[in-house]
Image: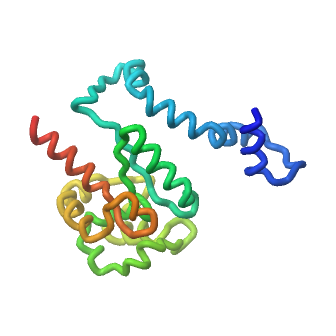
Amino acid sequence: MNIINEELDKIYKSTNYKISYDDLENLFMHLFKSDIYKDLASHFSLYFAAQDVTYSPTTDSLNMVIDRDKDSFTEEQYDEVIKFCNENNVNLYVSNPNFEFWLLLHFKEIESEDNQKLLENLKVNSSRRYIEERLHDICKYTKTKFLFEPFEKNVHGAILREKNYEENVNKLKNNLGTNIGKLVYSIIKAGNEK
Protein backbone atom coordinates (compact mmCIF):
# COMPACT_ATOMS: atom_id res chain seq x y z
CA MET A 1 0.00 0.00 0.00
CA ASN A 2 2.93 2.33 0.67
CA ILE A 3 4.06 2.04 -2.97
CA ILE A 4 0.61 3.13 -4.12
CA ASN A 5 0.73 6.15 -1.81
CA GLU A 6 4.14 7.11 -3.19
CA GLU A 7 2.83 6.87 -6.75
CA LEU A 8 -0.22 8.93 -5.84
CA ASP A 9 2.04 11.59 -4.35
CA LYS A 10 3.99 11.74 -7.61
CA ILE A 11 0.84 12.14 -9.68
CA TYR A 12 -1.06 14.49 -7.41
CA LYS A 13 1.31 16.95 -5.74
CA SER A 14 -1.42 18.82 -3.90
CA THR A 15 -2.65 17.22 -0.68
CA ASN A 16 -6.16 18.57 -1.19
CA TYR A 17 -6.53 17.24 -4.75
CA LYS A 18 -9.67 15.15 -5.13
CA ILE A 19 -9.77 12.36 -7.66
CA SER A 20 -12.98 12.42 -9.64
CA TYR A 21 -14.90 9.21 -10.16
CA ASP A 22 -14.30 9.43 -13.92
CA ASP A 23 -10.51 9.52 -13.34
CA LEU A 24 -10.38 6.38 -11.19
CA GLU A 25 -9.95 3.92 -14.05
CA ASN A 26 -7.08 5.97 -15.54
CA LEU A 27 -5.49 6.29 -12.12
CA PHE A 28 -5.59 2.55 -11.46
CA MET A 29 -4.26 1.79 -14.94
CA HIS A 30 -1.39 4.21 -14.32
CA LEU A 31 -0.60 2.68 -10.93
CA PHE A 32 -0.75 -0.92 -12.02
CA LYS A 33 0.18 -0.83 -15.71
CA SER A 34 3.68 -2.17 -15.13
CA ASP A 35 2.30 -5.15 -13.21
CA ILE A 36 -0.44 -5.66 -15.78
CA TYR A 37 2.05 -5.69 -18.67
CA LYS A 38 4.42 -8.03 -16.83
CA ASP A 39 1.59 -10.38 -15.99
CA LEU A 40 0.29 -10.32 -19.55
CA ALA A 41 3.73 -11.02 -21.01
CA SER A 42 4.52 -13.86 -18.64
CA HIS A 43 1.10 -15.49 -19.03
CA PHE A 44 0.07 -14.52 -22.54
CA SER A 45 -0.24 -18.14 -23.70
CA LEU A 46 -2.84 -18.69 -20.94
CA TYR A 47 -4.72 -15.58 -22.05
CA PHE A 48 -4.68 -16.80 -25.64
CA ALA A 49 -5.92 -20.23 -24.59
CA ALA A 50 -8.76 -18.64 -22.64
CA GLN A 51 -9.79 -16.77 -25.80
CA ASP A 52 -9.53 -19.88 -28.00
CA VAL A 53 -6.55 -18.35 -29.79
CA THR A 54 -3.84 -20.81 -30.71
CA TYR A 55 -0.26 -19.87 -29.95
CA SER A 56 2.87 -21.87 -30.58
CA PRO A 57 6.16 -20.43 -29.32
CA THR A 58 8.00 -22.30 -32.08
CA THR A 59 6.09 -20.61 -34.92
CA ASP A 60 4.43 -17.54 -33.37
CA SER A 61 5.84 -14.44 -31.74
CA LEU A 62 4.64 -11.72 -29.43
CA ASN A 63 5.09 -8.27 -30.98
CA MET A 64 4.48 -4.79 -29.60
CA VAL A 65 3.97 -1.89 -32.01
CA ILE A 66 4.16 1.61 -30.51
CA ASP A 67 4.64 5.24 -31.42
CA ARG A 68 7.54 7.12 -29.87
CA ASP A 69 5.19 10.02 -29.08
CA LYS A 70 7.51 12.31 -27.09
CA ASP A 71 4.55 14.34 -25.80
CA SER A 72 3.24 11.48 -23.65
CA PHE A 73 6.09 8.94 -23.55
CA THR A 74 9.16 9.98 -21.54
CA GLU A 75 12.67 8.73 -22.25
CA GLU A 76 12.58 6.73 -18.99
CA GLN A 77 9.31 5.08 -20.02
CA TYR A 78 10.78 4.31 -23.43
CA ASP A 79 13.77 2.62 -21.79
CA GLU A 80 11.42 0.65 -19.52
CA VAL A 81 9.48 -0.63 -22.54
CA ILE A 82 12.70 -1.78 -24.20
CA LYS A 83 13.81 -3.50 -20.99
CA PHE A 84 10.39 -5.12 -20.56
CA CYS A 85 10.41 -6.43 -24.14
CA ASN A 86 13.94 -7.78 -23.83
CA GLU A 87 13.15 -9.55 -20.55
CA ASN A 88 9.91 -11.07 -21.87
CA ASN A 89 10.93 -12.09 -25.39
CA VAL A 90 8.65 -9.51 -27.00
CA ASN A 91 9.66 -8.04 -30.36
CA LEU A 92 9.38 -4.26 -30.23
CA TYR A 93 8.45 -2.19 -33.27
CA VAL A 94 8.58 1.59 -32.98
CA SER A 95 7.71 4.47 -35.24
CA ASN A 96 9.16 7.88 -34.36
CA PRO A 97 7.39 10.24 -34.17
CA ASN A 98 4.21 8.25 -34.82
CA PHE A 99 2.64 5.44 -36.83
CA GLU A 100 1.74 7.81 -39.64
CA PHE A 101 5.46 8.09 -40.39
CA TRP A 102 5.39 4.41 -41.40
CA LEU A 103 2.37 5.13 -43.58
CA LEU A 104 4.09 8.09 -45.24
CA LEU A 105 6.96 5.79 -46.23
CA HIS A 106 4.55 4.15 -48.66
CA PHE A 107 4.81 7.17 -50.96
CA LYS A 108 7.77 8.52 -52.95
CA GLU A 109 6.86 12.04 -51.81
CA ILE A 110 8.62 11.35 -48.52
CA GLU A 111 11.95 11.55 -50.34
CA SER A 112 11.55 15.33 -50.73
CA GLU A 113 10.39 15.95 -47.14
CA ASP A 114 12.39 17.85 -44.54
CA ASN A 115 13.45 15.26 -41.93
CA GLN A 116 13.39 17.81 -39.11
CA LYS A 117 9.79 18.75 -39.90
CA LEU A 118 8.88 15.07 -39.95
CA LEU A 119 10.54 14.42 -36.58
CA GLU A 120 9.04 17.51 -34.93
CA ASN A 121 5.63 16.69 -36.43
CA LEU A 122 4.11 19.95 -35.20
CA LYS A 123 0.39 20.70 -35.30
CA VAL A 124 -0.62 22.36 -38.55
CA ASN A 125 -4.22 22.93 -37.50
CA SER A 126 -6.55 21.97 -34.67
CA SER A 127 -7.04 18.43 -35.91
CA ARG A 128 -3.82 17.38 -37.66
CA ARG A 129 -0.09 17.22 -37.23
CA TYR A 130 2.39 17.67 -40.08
CA ILE A 131 2.73 14.01 -41.14
CA GLU A 132 -0.99 13.36 -41.05
CA GLU A 133 -1.54 16.50 -43.15
CA ARG A 134 1.01 15.30 -45.71
CA LEU A 135 -0.72 11.91 -45.89
CA HIS A 136 -4.03 13.66 -46.40
CA ASP A 137 -2.54 15.72 -49.25
CA ILE A 138 -1.08 12.61 -50.91
CA CYS A 139 -3.85 10.02 -50.48
CA LYS A 140 -6.75 11.69 -48.60
CA TYR A 141 -5.76 9.84 -45.40
CA THR A 142 -7.71 10.44 -42.21
CA LYS A 143 -7.50 8.55 -38.93
CA THR A 144 -11.22 7.90 -38.98
CA LYS A 145 -11.46 6.64 -42.58
CA PHE A 146 -8.53 4.44 -43.51
CA LEU A 147 -8.41 3.29 -47.14
CA PHE A 148 -6.05 0.33 -47.31
CA GLU A 149 -5.50 0.11 -51.10
CA PRO A 150 -2.94 2.93 -51.56
CA PHE A 151 -0.83 1.47 -48.77
CA GLU A 152 -1.14 -2.17 -49.83
CA LYS A 153 0.13 -1.54 -53.35
CA ASN A 154 3.13 0.46 -52.00
CA VAL A 155 4.15 -1.72 -49.06
CA HIS A 156 7.34 -3.03 -50.69
CA GLY A 157 8.44 0.54 -51.42
CA ALA A 158 7.79 1.45 -47.77
CA ILE A 159 9.94 -1.46 -46.59
CA LEU A 160 12.79 -0.26 -48.84
CA ARG A 161 12.41 3.44 -47.92
CA GLU A 162 12.45 2.57 -44.22
CA LYS A 163 16.14 1.68 -44.59
CA ASN A 164 16.91 5.36 -45.30
CA TYR A 165 15.91 6.20 -41.72
CA GLU A 166 16.70 4.85 -38.26
CA GLU A 167 15.60 1.25 -37.62
CA ASN A 168 17.45 0.45 -34.38
CA VAL A 169 14.95 0.37 -31.49
CA ASN A 170 17.40 1.98 -29.05
CA LYS A 171 18.20 4.84 -31.44
CA LEU A 172 14.54 5.35 -32.38
CA LYS A 173 14.09 6.97 -28.98
CA ASN A 174 15.39 10.26 -30.41
CA ASN A 175 15.78 9.75 -34.15
CA LEU A 176 13.37 9.82 -37.08
CA GLY A 177 12.54 6.35 -38.31
CA THR A 178 10.71 3.10 -37.83
CA ASN A 179 11.30 -0.63 -37.89
CA ILE A 180 7.70 -1.63 -38.62
CA GLY A 181 8.79 -2.63 -42.13
CA LYS A 182 10.78 -5.48 -40.59
CA LEU A 183 7.61 -6.85 -39.00
CA VAL A 184 5.60 -6.41 -42.20
CA TYR A 185 8.35 -8.11 -44.22
CA SER A 186 8.40 -11.09 -41.83
CA ILE A 187 4.60 -11.42 -42.13
CA ILE A 188 4.76 -11.27 -45.94
CA LYS A 189 7.62 -13.79 -45.98
CA ALA A 190 5.76 -16.18 -43.66
CA GLY A 191 2.66 -15.92 -45.85
CA ASN A 192 4.65 -16.72 -48.98
CA GLU A 193 6.21 -19.80 -47.34
CA LYS A 194 2.82 -21.43 -46.75
Q: Position of residue 78 (x, y in %)?
A: 50, 55
Q: Position of residue 26 (x, y in %)?
A: 66, 42
What residue is shown at x 51% (from left), y 37% (from top)? 37
What residue is shown at x 73% (from left), y 38% (from top)? 4
Q: Where 171 sits versus 54, above or below?
A: below
Q: Position of residue 69 (x, y in %)?
A: 50, 60
Residue 29: quarter of image: top right
Q: Is residue 50 left or right of 10 when viewed as pictured?
A: left
Q: Is residue 75 left or right of 90 when viewed as pictured?
A: right
Q: Is residue 137 left or right of 97 when viewed as pictured?
A: left
Q: Nearer the viewer, residue 65 or 150?
A: 65
Farthest-out residue, left: 193
Q: Where 85 sits versus 74, above or below?
A: above
Q: Nearer the viewer, residue 170 or 21?
A: 170
Q: Is the N terminus in the top left, top right, bottom left or bottom right quadrant?
A: top right
Q: Where 81 sits versus 159, above or below?
A: above
Q: Is the C terminus in the top left, top right, bottom left or bottom right quadrant?
A: top left
What residue is shown at x 90% (from left), y 48% (from top)? 16
